């Protein structure tokens, strides 16, 4: 069994943010359009979480909604 102290949560959140950004761009959807589609009025939730700015990251609800809107399996964000 691995020691959880060796788990790098910062890299984990960065990987998810990068994957959301990549998939969003592949689908040709802007940060604003995605933000609005998941119920936010500004791009800050998406833009901050995509780059892990000030430790902002996507929660499971965000990821579920984003996966639905982008029509991808949620597992794509974790690869």
Image (spheres, rainbow, N blue to C red):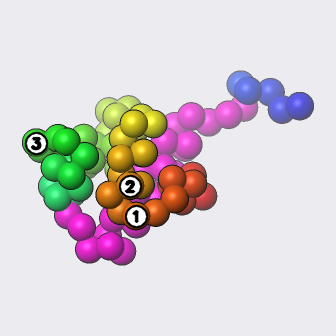
Q: Nearer the viewer, residue 6 or 36?
A: 36
Q: Position of residue 6 (x, y in %)?
A: 72, 31
Distance from Cα at disc 2 to Cα at disc 1: 5 Å
Tell me which residue sits at (17%, 41%) in the image: 40
SS at mark 1 in the image? loop
Local crowd size for mark 3, using a 10 Å CA cut-off: few (<14), some (14–19), many (≥20) = few
14 falls in the magenta region: yes
Of mark 3 and mark 2, the one earlier in the sequence is: 3
> Is residue 76 found left or right of 45 in the rendered image?
right
Q: Nearer the viewer, residue 37 or 48?
A: 37
Local crowd size for mark 2, using a 10 Å CA cut-off: few (<14), some (14–19), many (≥20) = some
Residue 15 sits above or below residue 39 on the image: below
Where is residue 25, by image quadrant?
bottom left
Where is residue 55, by image quadrant?
top left
Name the image quarter holding the N terminus: top right
28 falls in the magenta region: yes
Prevailing SS of the magenta stretch: helix
Q: Which residue is mark 2?
A: 68
Q: Which residue is mark 1?
A: 71
Distance from Cα at disc 1 to Cα at disc 3: 21 Å
- Numbered tag placed on residue 41 in the rendering: 3
SS at mark 2 in the image? helix
Q: Position of residue 5 (x, y in %)?
A: 71, 25
Q: Position of residue 67 (x, y in %)?
A: 41, 55
Local crowd size for mark 1, using a 10 Å CA cut-off: few (<14), some (14–19), many (≥20) = few
Residue 28 sits above or below residue 12 on the image: below
Q: Nearer the viewer, residue 37 or 30?
A: 37
């Amino acid at each position: 069994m691995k020691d959880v102290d060796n788990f790098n949560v910062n890299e984990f959140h960065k990987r998810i943010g990068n994957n959301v950004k990549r998939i969003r761009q592949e689908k040709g959807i802007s940060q604003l359009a995605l933000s609005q589609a998941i119920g936010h009025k500004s791009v800050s939730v998406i833009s901050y979480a995509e780059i892990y700015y000030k430790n902002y990251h996507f929660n499971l609800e965000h990821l579920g909604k984003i996966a639905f809107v982008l029509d991808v399996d949620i597992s794509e964000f974790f690869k």
